[in-house]
Amino acid sequence: MNHDARANGHCCRHDGAFRQAERARFENPRLGAGATAGYTRRLFHNARILLAAVGVVCLLGSSVGAAQELQHPPLMAAKFRPRAEVRLAAELAYAVEGERCARTADDVIGCTSLAFVGFEISPRYRLAERFSLGVLARFGVGDSSNVVQLAAEARVHWLGDAPIDPSLGLDAGAALAVDSVPQNELGDSESFVRAAPAFGASAAIDFAIGETVSLGLLMRATLLAFGTRPEPESRRPSYDTQVVFSGGVEGVYRFGAGG
């Protein structure tokens, strides 16, 4: 009983102290204003600390970024500079239209389709990202006939100066068919040369394997305008107009591209 009374008296004293404090703060508004002002000051103080910490982090981040840029300058799109290039190619070629005929005896004429293993070299000048002009030298080695072609070539590079370079080309020039006729009953071995205008179109796609070198694939169609083939009256072979398709691999070297 005494214990409960003491507990109740203790609670009453605490309750009375709380009410007295509330009454004093109500009667003296400065106490409440001071508490509010103190809370506001602490809030602004913490905000200043947070802003200072953010500023330090930003400063450190910008310093690290600047250091990285000094060590590794950003990759910027370099302005295209005209340059010289050279293309080398190896190909297999076959005439899908036209024949080569030769008299092998007084009463025997043999006709075959033109076929050869070809090699190309084409120095060119890249005037712009999407356009180049050059010359084409082509050499074909066949079973009985060899072909030499010299032409001027213009090429459009669809993606510009890109690591993957698909392109289309047109060429025009002249071709020589060089024939070696073995010895037979008509005479000793002889060589004959026949010339014709040559026109072609090609498609290629090259893949960069470095700053200056690309490797790719090439397809070409060539018209060798020999005209109408007359029946050979001697050992000299005769040709009619040939339509030659070829395909192969190529490599391109770009001078000054790595500078």
Image (spheres, helix red, strand yellow):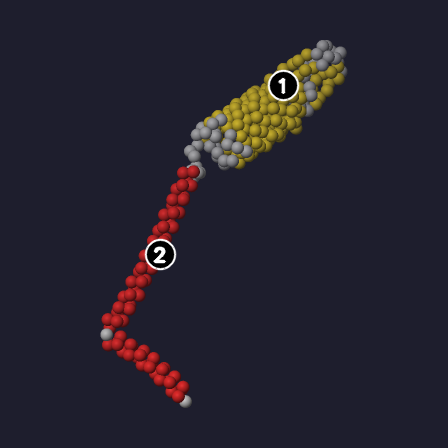
- Going from the N terminus, do you reach mark 1 or mark 2 first? 2
Compared with 177, 53 (above or below) is below
- Residue 10 figure quarter: bottom left
Q: Please state if 39 lies on the left or on the right of 96 as rendered.
A: left
- Tell me the quarter of the image containing the N terminus: bottom left
Tell me the crowding category of disc 2: few under 14, some 14 to 19, or many 20 or more residues within 10 angstroms, Cα based. Answer: few
Q: Name the foreground residue: 255 vs 143.
A: 255
Residue designated by label 2: 50
| Count of marks overlaid on the render | 2
**Which residue, as the protein is rendered here, is positioned at the far front?**
2
Q: Please state if 230 lies on the left or on the right of 198 as rendered.
A: right
Tell me the crowding category of disc 1: few under 14, some 14 to 19, or many 20 or more residues within 10 angstroms, Cα based. Answer: many
Amino acid identity at mark 1: Ala
Q: Is residue 234 visible?
A: no
Element under disc 2: helix
Task: For marks 1 and 2, give the one nearer the viewer.
Answer: 2
Q: Name the foreground residue: 244 vs 140.
A: 140
- Residue 31 figure quarter: bottom left
Amino acid identity at mark 2: Leu
Residue designated by label 1: 177
Residue 103: percent from left, percent from top: 72, 16
Residue 68: percent from left, percent from top: 42, 41
Q: Is residue 252 visible?
A: yes
